[in-house]
């Protein structure tokens, strides 16, 4: 019988059984490899790829601690369910929450009886120290970023300004998860995995949860490290596509140039895509990326209103947005437009400016989200001031409030636009996204993915929401012109 792990990392269920998860759990994978290199026994259970009961896994492995990665959203309910059952059945096992939600909501999480500790921000160094002190039986209460309980009191230490050197960290612990279950079929490649090669973001967008972190800065792996990881996944798992799943892949132009030059020099036949920022749009750079097999760039345009763009501190305007997509079109790169609706004080006129912009852009995919105020962000404080916004009182309520694309009442709407219109507009873009993706798949002769979208996305309800959004808009214009 193998030795029980010191810590079992659990990635709570947050996806759908209709296909593979949208990304590998890199937060956990990097933590696991870092601790493993330091002599800590680790294991991983991802409920998004494994249908077994997490509590049965805990019973089987009997770890000293459980580490749950908890994003803000419905995954909170799953994390609560696992934590409560684990604490009830295995009282001696310490339960640690890390990730976005305990970083933004430390007190709410620590008020939960089943949670013993939280780690805020970057987790490698504080978690190593916490595990070391727990294994010695003597809690070190001075660990930066640690949240814990002392009797009835909740104590949260300030986060550290110390970050690990990413290029000195070990490769992600891919061996601890079932990699084939994460391989996805995308229009630009049939066997795609995600990679995460940087942390932090240099921008100060007023809506972004990054602004809720006490300390964060952009850092990235060097070009050689990126190329090494990509080739490992290609050679080991036969992937032919990579989606760089991170806030700002191309912040460091030199590392992107170096990576592209390596791809070209070695004639590496792996297609790839990445997120970018409008201010980084550069024709010569995009031409180089295309020659290195980049197929697809995703930009956050956020809004088609210059007033809203200024409100959210986006550092771009409508003309810059239009130019970036024209550059992609000239270069021959596919593009996506990620935008948000329902901003605080946003009017119907400004929302329509966004709709008009995104529908005229030469973007191949449109992805629409609805604004939610995250604690610690400037726009959150603005919502408190102009909308009397109050953070939901419980973890269960927070799970519902931050649920992607859901609004249960008008009190959650921070804009001046009717809630029903926001929801119907968003769902109409879901249908448009499916249509555009299907067209791309046909162009790339990816017929398997076309069938998937026809089955999963192009449902009557999606088309109904498209018509409902159109009718709502017509009614608004009629009333306005009376």
Image (spheres, helix red, strand yellow):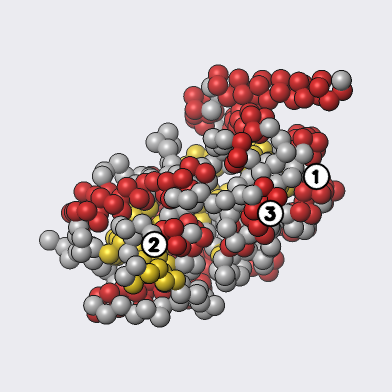
According to the picture, the residue beneath numbered tag 2 turns out to be 110
Q: In which quarter of the view is residue 26 placed?
A: bottom left
Q: Which residue is mark 1?
A: 305
Give how far apart the Cα atoms at labels 2 and 3 are.
27 Å
Element at label 2: helix
Residue 430 in the image: x percent, y percent? 60, 32
Dot 1: element: loop
Position of residue 333 measured from the top left corner of the image (x, y, whole percent): 70, 45
In 3D space, how far apart are the residues under numbered discs 2 and 1 (Cα atoms)?
A: 40 Å
The earlier-in-sequence mark between 2 and 1 is 2
- Tell me what residue is drawn at x 30 percent, y 41 percent: 51
Q: Is residue 123 visible?
A: no
Residue 385, which numbered label?
3
Would residue 266 be found to the left or right of residue 143 on screen?
right
- The quarter in which the C terminus is drawn is top right
**Quadrant of the image occupied by residue 245:** bottom right
For the residues carrying marks 3 and 1, which lies nearer the camera in this image? 3
Q: Nearer the viewer, mark 2 or mark 1?
A: 2
């Amino acid at each position: 019988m193998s030795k029980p792990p010191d810590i079992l990392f659990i990635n709570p269920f947050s996806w759908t059984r209709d296909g593979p998860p949208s990304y590998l759990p890199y937060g956990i994978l990097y933590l696991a490899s870092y601790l493993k290199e330091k002599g800590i026994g680790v294991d991983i259970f991802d409920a998004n790829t494994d249908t077994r009961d997490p509590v049965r896994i805990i019973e089987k492995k009997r770890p000293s601690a459980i580490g749950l990665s908890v994003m803000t959203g419905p995954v909170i309910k799953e994390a609560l369910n696992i934590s409560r059952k684990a604490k009830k059945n295995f009282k001696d096992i310490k339960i640690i929450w890390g990730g976005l939600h305990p970083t933004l909501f430390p007190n709410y999480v620590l008020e939960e009886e089943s949670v013993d500790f939280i780690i805020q921000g970057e987790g490698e160094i504080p978690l190593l120290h916490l595990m070391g002190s727990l294994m010695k039986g003597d809690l070190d209460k001075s660990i930066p970023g640690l949240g814990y309980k002392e009797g009835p009191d909740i104590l949260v230490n300030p986060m550290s300004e110390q970050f690990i050197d990413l290029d000195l960290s070990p490769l992600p612990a891919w061996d601890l998860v079932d990699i084939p279950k994460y391989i996805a079929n995308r229009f630009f490649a049939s066997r795609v995995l995600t990679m995460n090669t940087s942390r932090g973001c240099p921008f100060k967008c007023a809506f972004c949860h990054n602004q809720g972190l006490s300390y964060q800065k952009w850092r990235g792996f060097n070009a050689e490290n990126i190329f090494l990881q990509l080739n490992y996944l290609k050679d080991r798992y036969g992937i032919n596509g990579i989606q760089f799943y991170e806030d700002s892949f191309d912040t460091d132009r030199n590392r992107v140039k170096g990576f592209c030059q390596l791809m070209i020099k070695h004639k590496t036949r792996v297609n790839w895509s990445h997120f970018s920022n409008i201010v980084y749009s550069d024709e010569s750079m995009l031409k180089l990326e295309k020659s290195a097999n980049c197929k697809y760039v995703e930009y956050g345009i956020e809004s088609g209103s210059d007033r809203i763009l200024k409100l959210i501190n986006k550092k771009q305007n409508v003309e810059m947005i239009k130019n970036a997509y024209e550059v992609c079109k000239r270069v021959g790169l596919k593009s996506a437009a990620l935008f948000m609706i329902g901003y605080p004080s946003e009017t119907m006129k400004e929302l329509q400016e966004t709709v008009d912009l995104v529908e005229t852009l030469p973007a191949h995919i449109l992805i629409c989200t609805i604004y939610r105020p995250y604690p610690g962000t400037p726009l959150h404080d603005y919502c408190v001031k102009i909308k009397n916004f109050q953070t939901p009182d419980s973890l269960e309520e927070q799970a519902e409030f931050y649920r992607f694309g859901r609004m249960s009442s008008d009190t959650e709407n921070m804009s001046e636009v009717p809630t029903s219109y926001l929801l119907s507009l968003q769902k109409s873009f879901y249908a448009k996204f499916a249509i555009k993706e299907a067209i791309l798949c046909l162009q790339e002769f990816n017929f398997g993915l076309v069938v998937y979208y026809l089955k999963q996305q192009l449902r009557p309800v999606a088309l109904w929401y498209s018509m409902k959004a159109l009718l709502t808009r017509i009614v608004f214009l009629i009333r306005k012109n009376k």
